[in-house]
Image (tube, rainbow, N blue to C red):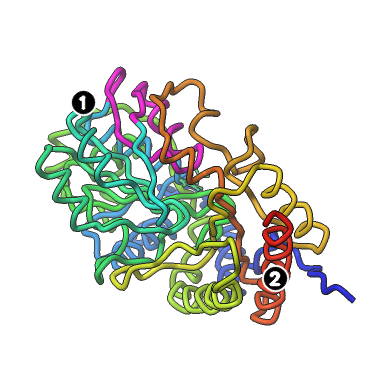
């Protein structure tokens, strides 16, 4: 009899008890707004920012309403405005070009490699076209950050990092989000910590941090922050910076603090699952797993593989067969966006030059989420199913 998988690809773990207790205490206090504090009290949000700054080694941290908000705020804070061009990955998800569009700027898409990272040769060729790069570490794949930063420094391009899939990851020992001027993270349910919605912006640059705090809607109460610059920095920017409210609240912060404390253990659990699937897919005929370099410390919260050179019909046949056996795979080659899996040519507000390398990669790119509710045995089973179905469709075509 054929094995099938019966678990859910969208079921997260519960919020830790410590988070539920802290959330109840916030609810009982009634002080949900981050600036609603009693004398001598620091809000859950301020404490969360202090803890996330410590976790990433950043001087400053701001907690906000979403990862997308963190990115648009970072772009505004570094001076991106209407009509400006912003370099970004062609292979990413909709919140990234959306953040660029939200400030009236225009994305310039850069090709992707078979390692699923930004193509640094294409970046070098296009670097003269913009002053800012919004770099997306899409699906947790980190490019050679040393070379990327050298390219951007030479072309005077400011780097803002989208770390929605790299919270807890690092390049050559340096936490993801700490290479460019600012790093942006998401706390949305499907990312590495879960408050439903939420985000972080980290930076070492005092004026960027002060502008971000004011942009987020600080009502000039910035002295209630624990991970913000000194008041004199705010004096320099406060009259020139608009309030575009997008704050974190104390309820979400209370839920997040125990999750941040457990992030290291969660990363280990994700990687145990990732490596089980990776191992199970090794040497499957017709299937390529992206090589992960030594310097990359990744978080295996999802896995990708390539069916390079396959026809759309055969890729769809694999997806269909796996779905019948309970394994939900996403495909970046589909002509229409499906749920989260959109592609650059479906963002029609942001016209793009042809991107042949990206088209080639996306045509064979399969993506699968790895929720922590999967056991190691579940992961081994999923890999057996994918391996069997990919092999059999591949062999039938040869
Ligand atoms: C989820 C995500 C974000 C941020 O999304 P929000 O839903 O706004 O928190 C940014 N970039 C990528 C690649 C994402 O997947």
Q: Which quadrant of the figure has residue 227?
A: bottom left
The residue depicted at 18 percent of the width and 51 percent of the height is: 149
Residue at numbered disc 1: 240
Quadrant of the snapshot with the N terminus: bottom right
Find the residue positioned furthest to the top. Answer: 83
Provide the secondary structure element on which disc 2 rests. Answer: helix
Find the residue positioned furthest to the right. Answer: 1
- The crowd level at tag 1 (other Cα within 10 Å; few <14, some 14-19, many 20+) is few
Which dot, 1 or 2, sits closer to the camera? 2
| Mark 2 CB near ligand 1 (8 Å cut) | no
Q: Earlier in the sequence, mark 1 or mark 2?
A: 1
Residue 197 in sight in this render = yes
Give coordinates of residue 190: x percent, y percent: 58, 56
Give coordinates of residue 307: x percent, y percent: 57, 54
Residue numbers of the magenta segment: 81-108
Which of the pair 181/320 is nearer the observer?
A: 320
Q: Is residue 27 left or right of residue 123?
A: right
The residue depicted at 69 percent of the width and 81 percent of the height is: 377
Find the residue positioned furthest to the front. Answer: 398
Q: Is residue 225 left or right of residue 317?
A: left
- Please say if 26 is above or below 35: below
Q: Is residue 97 magenta?
A: yes
Residue at numbered disc 2: 382
Instruction: Give the CA distance from mark 1 to mark 2.
Output: 54 Å
Find the residue positioned furthest to the bottom. Answer: 377
Give coordinates of residue 201: x percent, y percent: 34, 49
Quadrant of the snapshot with the C terminus: bottom right
- Please say if 113 is above or below 262: above
- Numbered label tally: 2
């Amino acid at each position: 009899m054929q094995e099938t998988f019966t678990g859910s690809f969208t079921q997260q773990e519960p919020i830790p008890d410590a988070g539920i207790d802290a959330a109840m205490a916030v609810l009982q206090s009634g002080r949900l707004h981050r600036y609603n504090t009693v004398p001598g009290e620091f809000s859950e949000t301020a404490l969360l920012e202090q803890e996330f700054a410590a976790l990433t080694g950043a001087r400053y941290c701001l907690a906000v309403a979403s990862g997308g908000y963190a990115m648009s705020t970072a772009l505004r804070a570094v001076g991106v405005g209407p009509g400006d061009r912003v370099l970004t990955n062609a292979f990413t998800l909709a919140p990234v070009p959306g953040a660029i569009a939200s400030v009236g700027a225009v994305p310039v898409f850069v090709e992707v490699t078979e390692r699923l990272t930004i193509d640094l040769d294409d970046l070098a060729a296009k670097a003269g076209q913009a002053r800012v790069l919004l770099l997306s570490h899409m699906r947790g794949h980190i490019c050679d950050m040393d070379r990327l930063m050298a390219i951007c420094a030479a072309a005077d391009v400011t780097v803002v990092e989208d770390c929605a899939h790299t919270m807890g990851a690092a390049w050559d020992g340096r936490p993801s989000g700490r290479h460019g001027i600012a790093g942006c993270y998401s706390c949305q349910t499907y990312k590495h910590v879960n408050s439903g919605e939420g985000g972080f912006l980290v930076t070492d640059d005092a004026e960027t941090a002060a502008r971000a705090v004011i942009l987020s809607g600080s009502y000039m109460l910035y002295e209630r922050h624990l991970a913000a610059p000194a008041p004199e920095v705010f004096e320099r920017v406060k009259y020139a910076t608009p309030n575009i409210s997008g704050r974190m609240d104390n309820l979400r912060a209370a839920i997040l603090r125990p999750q941040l404390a457990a992030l290291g253990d969660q990363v280990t659990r994700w990687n145990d699952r990732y490596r089980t699937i990776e191992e199970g897919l090794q040497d499957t005929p017709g299937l390529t797993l992206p090589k992960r370099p030594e310097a990359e410390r990744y978080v295996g919260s999802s896995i990708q593989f390539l069916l390079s050179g396959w026809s759309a019909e055969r890729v769809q046949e694999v997806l269909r067969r796996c779905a019948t056996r309970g394994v939900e795979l996403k495909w970046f080659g589909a002509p229409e966006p499906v749920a989260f899996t959109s592609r650059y040519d479906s963002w029609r507000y942001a016209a793009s030059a042809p991107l042949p390398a990206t088209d080639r990669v996306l045509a064979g790119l399969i993506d699968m989420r790895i929720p922590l509710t999967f056991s190691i045995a579940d992961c081994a089973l999923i890999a057996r199913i994918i391996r069997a179905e990919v092999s059999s469709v591949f062999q039938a075509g040869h």
